[in-house]
Image (cartoon, rainbow, N blue to C red):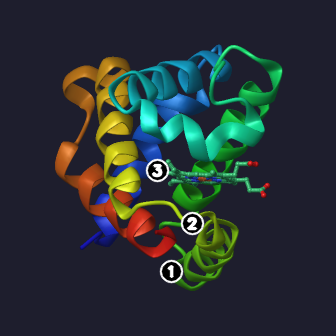
Amino acid sequence: DCNKLEGLKVKLQWARAFGTAHDRLAFGLELWKGILREHPEIKEPFGRVRGDNIYSPEFGAHSQRVLSGLDITISMLDTPDMLAAQLAHLKSQHVERNLKPEFFDIFLNHLLEVLGDHLGTNLDFTAWKDCINHIIDDIK
Ligand code: HEM
């Protein structure tokens, strides 16, 4: 479970990795490049936003929507009621898209990899696993 201390650590580390990223688009590219290279079947659900070309403006805009969505949830890790409301909203945006639950686990694993590239040994792997698992479990 994502406890209070872990939630605060994740907030801080996310601010370091993403909040100060000079290029948020590049952060998204790193993430999706890894996901879609290893799991090309995930291009299909992203057909409308051009999953076939992650360099397109359509996919770039989508990528920013997802990362901003993640940014919102992480900012709520210390306000559980608001987090629950936001996660219910995100779930409603995903539920009819017929996504496999394992897609979310793949997303989590790749997110941890990109964060590790940015934060090195400052990444609290356990805190991230616990807190992002909580977020992802409530969306999938
Ligand atoms: C923490 C994880 C995630 C967050 C915060 C997130 C957030 C979002 C947001 C904010 C949107 C835009 C909703 C809208 O404007 O209608 C979206 C759309 C979408 N997401 Fe996610 N997402 C997450 C994970 C995933 C995963 C793992 C998948 C599947 C691999 C996925 C598949 C989609 C699809 C297919 C769309 C719709 C694309 C379109 O516009 O056609 N999401 N997501």
Q: Is residue 124 left or right of residue 85?
A: left
- Give the distance between the C-alpha atoms of the residues marked 1 and 3, in whole angstroms: 14 Å
Report whether 139 appears left or right of 121: right
Q: Amino acid at mark 1?
A: Pro
- Label 1: which secondary element: helix
Q: Residue at x 18, y 51 (%)?
A: 126
Give, as a three-letter code, the residue at label 3: Lys
User: Are dots 1 and 2 in contact, CB under 8 Å?
Assistant: yes
Query: Can the viewer see residue 67 in this picture?
Result: no
Q: Which residue is rendered at x = 48% and y = 19% of the image?
A: 30
Residue ID for mark 1: 80
Q: Residue at x 33, y 24 (%)?
A: 119
- The three-letter amino acid code for the residue at tag 2 is Met
Please give the residue where the numbered disc 3 appears in the rendered image.
11
Identify residue for label 2: 76
Position of 121 compared to 44: left or right? left
Q: Position of residue 98 (x, y in %)?
A: 55, 65
Residue 96 vs residue 23, the one in the foreground: 96
Mark 3 beta carbon near ligand 1 (under 8 Å): no
Q: Nearer the viewer, residue 20 or 47?
A: 47
User: Is the residue under label 3 in contact with that under label 1 (CB below 8 Å)?
Assistant: no
Does the beta carbon at disc 1 come under 8 Å from ligand 1? no
Tell me the quadrant of the picture where the N terminus can be found. bottom left
